[in-house]
Image (cartoon, coloured by chain):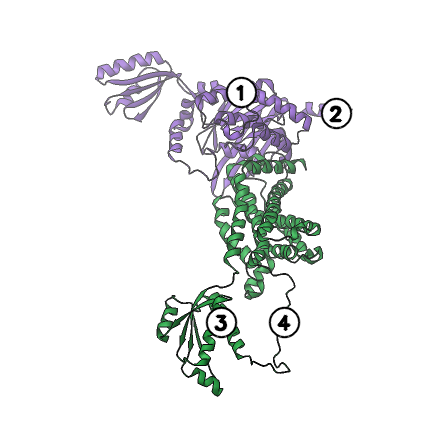
Amino acid sequence: MNRIMAIVEREMRKFFRSPALMLASMIFPLVQLVILGNAFGGKIRDARLAVVDEDGGTQALKIREAFDSVRVNIRTFVPIYYDDEKKAVEDVRNGKLDGAVIIPPQFSRRVYEVNHPQIAVVVDNSDNFMSSALESELTDLVNALNQPQVEPRILQQTALEIVELYPYIEYMKYLLPGSLALAMFVSVMIGGGMLYIDDKARGVHEGYLVTPITKLELVLGLNLAGAIKAVMTGVIICVIGSLIAGVSTIFNPVTMLGLLVMIVLTSLAFNTMMFLLMVRIEDPLVPRAMFGILNTLLFFPSGSIYPIQAFPSWLRAIARVDPFTYAVDGFKCLLLKETTLAAVWGDMLFLSLFAAITLGIAIPLFKRTL
Amino acid sequence: MSDFSASEKNSLLPASEAARAIEVDHIVKKYGDFTAVDDVSFNVNNGEIFGLLGPNGAGKSTLIRMMTTLIPITAGIARIDGHDVAKDPDAVRRTIGVIPQALTSDLDLTVEENLNIYAKLYDVPAKERKRSIEELLGLVDLTKWRGAQTKTLSGGMRRRLEIARGLVHHPKIFFLDEPTTGLDPVSRVAVWEMLGNIKSQRQLTILITTHYMDEADRLCDRIAIVDHGKLVALDAPMALKASVPGSNVIEAQFENPPADWEQRLHTLDEVTSVQHEGAGMYRVLTGNGSRTTTELVEMAVAAGVPVKSLSVQNTTLDDVFVHYTGRQLRDELQKAYAFVMPQRPGLQP
């Protein structure tokens, strides 16, 4: 035990003497939280939409009035009036416009004759988000125009009522659990991965190996030290991140306890995973090269930035064994849904088992000789 | 009663074996097809300073790493203080102190913190730890620097810290792998003096590897010369020097010597060997330096060959190395230095 603590003591003293490491592991996830949180998930505003009125009748005027009201109210798009349909389509193609609405000749007449009146929408579907936002706004608009002035006594349509369980969650809040997990991962990557290999290359381990320390003591000491660094990073990011994203659940004592347990288990699972990956590596370049790959492979499938339900099955399979997924799920439950610990015990169990299994494989693989 | 039987048991051992700190018996280390250490045997007596001398890549570090449990032994047996290295590595580790070739103390930690961590790794009790570190700081003359971060220390001071680190648990046998490589001449002498000092204060057997002749000559009671993984000679420095025929070395450089100059130098009185080293440089071993020198100068004047430089020395370990391996150690070192290993990332200068 004494010898395990000697290893931990050495790592901790070193850690506090080089604050650059601590800062590096914290700044990256925070920058991501702020930038991605603000860049994604916002509503589309002021898209440029051409309106070509080839009809000029009263019904077309009604549509143009509706477009003008969108411009002053919800501001999804700004209508720009064109005379030439070809020119409008050309401008959508070359990116001057985000879409075009064409009101064909005889539109008003067809409306009065109830003869399938249609208006055409041309969208630039190379930008998925933009085109779907325009499509949905225009669909709403057309539906509203289709509503009869006087409603029948019995509603013919079945409406879908959406009940949101939680208050409106902004994208930045949605990102917070992922950023928290990412902060711990970066800490483990640097503190448990890169420093471990650097120490090996510098001969620090050679110094350890000539002392009577056992294999188990050395592995436990190194893993404990790596996990403690990740826990400290996790606690700090949990507080700062919650304040930035405006999540107030961290002030609830039960949630606080749950978060702490989740942070400890996540740190252990991440560090033992990193240790297993690094246990036979000698070249200090390897962890640096692996950083980007591991980050993409583990962080993105975890549901941190996009829901797992939208993944193809092979990506879901990765998500299922990725400790990130369980960490993000646990943090999401505690931070955003204010659930009790009962809701996250599955995540906690997975992370504990994951840590135990990876450590169980790493110990026999660890070489007690050079 | 049990004490008596134990001492009786010990006394049954032959005196020579009881006095042995290190026994290396037909030890071999292979890496695939390459044999790094090839059937080496030697013993080191208690209280001795034993030197392994050889050029870079001779197998010195491999030998020391096998003896200190760092790498597995391919064949043969090594016993440290009676413990088999392969069978009881833990007992060996408790008995030995090791200073690896690279400076491995933690640069971010202070001198005292580095020593403290190692004392803990060796399970030195808290009370004893404090006293031992105090004593060691004095011994290696770092008391003044105890609170300084290791990265602020000079190379020589860092080496002294490592020496103290290897002694925190009062080892019986001390292994030092090239302790003065990379140090300036003043720091080297300081390290030598310190080792002498430590030796006189503690009951210690020291095994040291080096490629410096002067270091081996000055420090060691006995020297083993290692070349290409093999032991080529083993004796006290004086005895090794005496084993080389001739007692003096004349190094002379001539301007445009004739082709048969080497043979003509051989004919001089008491000359035992002549070696042509290129560029008109000759190395002549002789039993009588002054007489051969006089004759050599007379012969050069008579033949009209100008002498560019001339020096007469007593035989050194360098000559011993030439005698046993056919090559000069300094040439070997030059070859090794010509190839500069790229620095490993994270490796501190």
Q: Which mark is residue A161?
A: 4
Marks 4, 2 in one chain:
no
Q: Are marks 2 and 1 in contact (CB under 8 Å)?
A: no
Q: Are marks 2 and 3 in contact (CB under 8 Å)?
A: no
Of the residues tagged 1 and 4, which is closer to the observer?
A: 4
Q: Label 4: state its secondary structure.
A: loop
Q: Position of residue A27 (x, y in %)?
A: 53, 46
Of the residues tagged 1 and 3, which is closer to the observer?
A: 3
Marks 2, 3 in one chain:
no
The residue wearing badge 3 is A135
**Disc 4 residue type?**
Glu
**Disc 3 residue type?**
Glu
- Mark 1–mark 3 Cα distance, whole angstroms, equals 84 Å
- Mark 3–mark 4 Cα distance, whole angstroms, equals 21 Å
Q: Are marks 3 and 4 in contact (CB under 8 Å)?
A: no
Q: Residues within 10 Å of mark 1 (few under 14, many from 20)?
A: some
**Disc 1 residue type?**
Met
- Left of A259 or right of it: where is B198? left
Host chain of mark 2:
B
* Residue A42 vs residue A362, the one in the foreground: A42
Q: Label 3: state its secondary structure.
A: helix
Q: Position of residue A124 (x, y in %)?
A: 42, 69
Q: Which mark is residue B194?
A: 1
The residue wearing badge 2 is B5
